[in-house]
Amino acid sequence: MKSSRLIAFEALYKIFYDNAYSNIALDKAIRDIDTDKPFISALIYGVCERRITLDYFIEKYVTSKPKPKIMTILRMGAYQLLFMDKVPSSASINESVKLTKDIKQSYYASLVNAVLHKIDRDRTIPDDLSIKYSVPKNLINMWVKQYGKDVVEDFLPYVNDRPPVFAIPNRLFVDNEELQYELLCEGIECEVVGDIVMITSPFDLSKSVAFKNGLFHIEDLSSYECALSLGAKAGDVVLDMCSAPGGKAFTIAEKMGNKGKILAFDLHEHRVNQIEQGAKRLGIDIIEAGINDATVYNDKLPKADKILCDVVCSGFGIIRRKPEIRYKELDSIAQLPSIQLKILETSSRYLKDNGTIIYSTCTLNKKENEKVVNAFIENNSDFTLISEKTTFPSQFGGDGFYVAVIKKNEN
């Protein structure tokens, strides 16, 4: 049987050197095991999140960059030493040395042992924003330029926290207090926050009776508030242009009292299936999910009262959920604003007079947010920007998010 650290090592190696997504690599790593899941999860996500900090310490004590497999072991060991208080230093070091032998790299055991011992004696993290919070300098510089240093320093402490988990009551069946009662009866600790419920203890979603019975869905707070800002009401025709996995569509449908029509789209069939399965579990029957390319006008779609464009983006607002996103090269996302504008312009053609369209992203980048919306308004005089809001990550709040509410003028 593989050790917990070997399982984590294999997942991290795939993430760092095979470009695997952290959430997918983690799911595969723990799918068929029953023990140590929290430790493995914390180690995988933690090493991904803190890579810059870990590399700072490792590079102080090696003369040349280690081979990828040894670098992965050193990162794991350094993370346990620096950030896992419940793991004794001796275990962090000895198990890392053992891991070199498990992967048939015992030649490097003495190197791993020496470097980790030095890190164990040198735990002072410098007061440099990039090293302290393990966020690339170019991303921090972009944020400071766009939002100001004070704003950035306020939200950076939360980008490596575990994000809060919010349960959205299915108001076709329960309200927030009734949902809280159901969850507490299952031993799931939670508290009412506004009109939703924040879960405050570890839990297995697949084993929750309330979840199986369709009493709630999981959705980030910023995403939930975005869906509400659409202002959909019973009887509306709504288009959700980039819907999967469907959380906003579910919130909108419940807000509409399951009366009206929601067409929810994605490019890929398996993600369309996600929407359909979620709607079925929640007892929602006004959602019709299908495949559609949001950049191409589809004359088969109806005119809509409300449209949601939660577009593909760089994802810099959700790096605490997908830590590897922070390491994207900024040049690699340069083409996104033109795609986002195309989606907004194409989607706006389906909107009725006096209708509302929302443009939203889960990123913190004005080139993908305000500048796209400004370009759209400048090119389309029959639309008016009603409001726009940027939300930054916080301890008990939602992810980084941008929402613009736009109205189509009556002709």
Image (tube, helix red, strand yellow):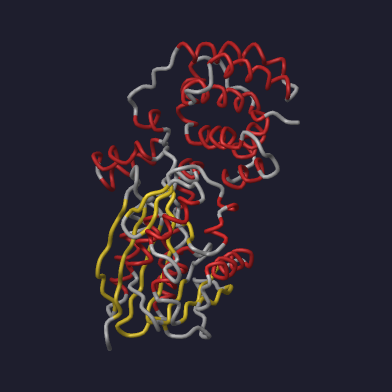
Quadrant of residue 394 within the rendered picture: top left
* Residue furthest out toward the front: 185
Q: Taking 342 as reference, is 85 above or below it?
A: above
Q: Position of residue 139 (x, y in %)?
A: 39, 41
Q: Give residue 197's position: percent from left, percent from top.
A: 39, 54
Q: Residue at left 46%, top 11%?
A: 121
Quarter that holds the N terminus: top right
> In the image, what residue occupies the spot 68% across and 22% down?
99
Image quarter for residue 144?
A: top left
**Above or below 83: residue 139:** below
Which of 299 and 166 lies nearest the eye of the viewer? 166
Q: Residue at x 55, y 63 (%)?
A: 213
| Quadrant of the image containing the C terminus | bottom left
Task: Choose between 145 and 385: the one closer to the eye.
Answer: 385
Determine whether, in the image, residue 380 is placed left or right of residue 293: left
Residue furthest to the bottom in view is 411
The location of residue 92, given as percent across then percent down, is 57, 19
Q: Nearer the viewer, residue 344 or 44?
A: 44
Query: Residue 391: x and y, percent?
Result: 31, 53
Q: With respect to residue 235, does 132 lie above or below? A: above
Compared to 266, does 203 lie above or below? above
| 26 relative to 234 in the view: left or right | right
Residue at point 43%, 85% (across, down):
303
Total number of numbered labels? Answer: 0
